[in-house]
Amino acid sequence: MPDRLEFDDDRCPVCGETRRHDVVGTPYRSCSSCGHHDAGRRVESGAVINHALGDQPPATSVLEREQVRTLVRAGWERQRVIDLGCGHGGFLHAVDVLRGLPPGSYGVEVSPESVEAAARWFGLEVRTGLSADGLPTAVTSWHSAEHIPLAVLRDALASVDHADSLIVISVPNAASWQWRLFGPRWTYYDVTSHRSQFTPRSLDLLMTQAGWTSAARPRMVLYELFGAVQSLVNVIRPHNRLYETLKRGRGGARRIDIVGDAVVAAFMAVPAVLLALGGLLVPDRASCVNAVYRRSSP
């Protein structure tokens, strides 16, 4: 396998397979070998502002707390933390509040508005790229890898080469039961900014190409439960309107629309829990691929 794969739209950008088919109703092509979904040039930019950027910083969320716990359970031993696609810096701030942020930690972000908010709210260092400098590092990527061109992502992760480093990553799972059940109504389906939809196999292959070995598949309850609730709401309400309004501060919804979406979400609670439980019991079919990687032996 070559160190870096560059293919045109006729080949899977992960494994190079030529047998691919269009995913009906989406801009993606699915690889028959690794299952990876690639939008090619049909997604022009993966940049997104993932949080309403007001005057006051948000409180540390329940999800950010779960992300910190996942990092600790992954074997984090106080290496500096680099959060790839850090947004407004909420996760790094949560690490600082709950565990203390090690010196040299920083975020990587391309949205100027988010970079400004991370500095203004939390005093964080944010860079536009990941620098390779030979230090032990814990790289985190919470639903950002699917926004990044694969060649750029592969090279960035390959540059972190210290033997005591680790990567904790979460991406939407194109092999999940939720994707198969809901298709474009799936909450993690974002045709405007997701260049890729990974599968457990395609993510492992990409990480192997970058010099990493799979070490664990942590279960993350909130990603699974949120995906189930919002997807079920999407069946009868506009796609992700509740999420877009409450978290991202947009969506153009009236108050009565949000109340209606919330009522539907409440009625969907029981089937959502059952659906989420299935993903938690079978991680490779969970709504998100949550994975820990360690540096491969030379």
Image (cartoon, grey):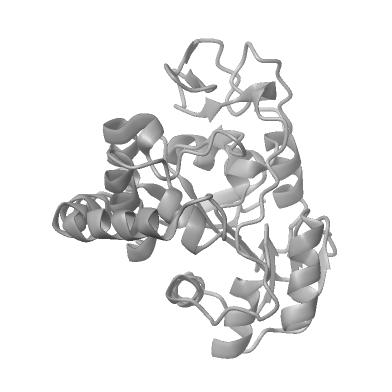
Give coordinates of residue 238: x percent, y percent: 39, 41
Question: Is 180 positioned to the left or the right of 136 in the image?
Answer: left
Q: Residue at x 81, y 69 (%)?
A: 116
Give coordinates of residue 170: x percent, y percent: 50, 54
Q: Residue at x 50, y 73 (%)?
A: 64
The correct choice, above or below, for 214 with respect to 95 in the image is: above
Is residue 126 visible in the rendered image? The answer is yes
Q: Residue at x 57, y 26 (%)?
A: 38
Please state, as top left, top right, bottom left or bottom right, where the N terminus lies in the image.
Answer: top right
Question: Is 217 positioned to the left or the right of 228 in the image?
Answer: right
Total numbered labels placed on residues in the image: 0
The correct choice, above or below, for 71 with respect to 141 in the image is: below
**On the image, which quarter does residue 148 sit in?**
top right
Q: Residue at x 66, y 29 (%)?
A: 43
Give coordinates of residue 7: x percent, y percent: 70, 19
Instruction: Please tell me which residue lies in front, 94 or 297.
Output: 94
Give coordinates of residue 94: x percent, y percent: 57, 80
The correct choice, above or below, for 281 with respect to 163 in the image is: above
Is residue 215 visible in the rendered image? The answer is no
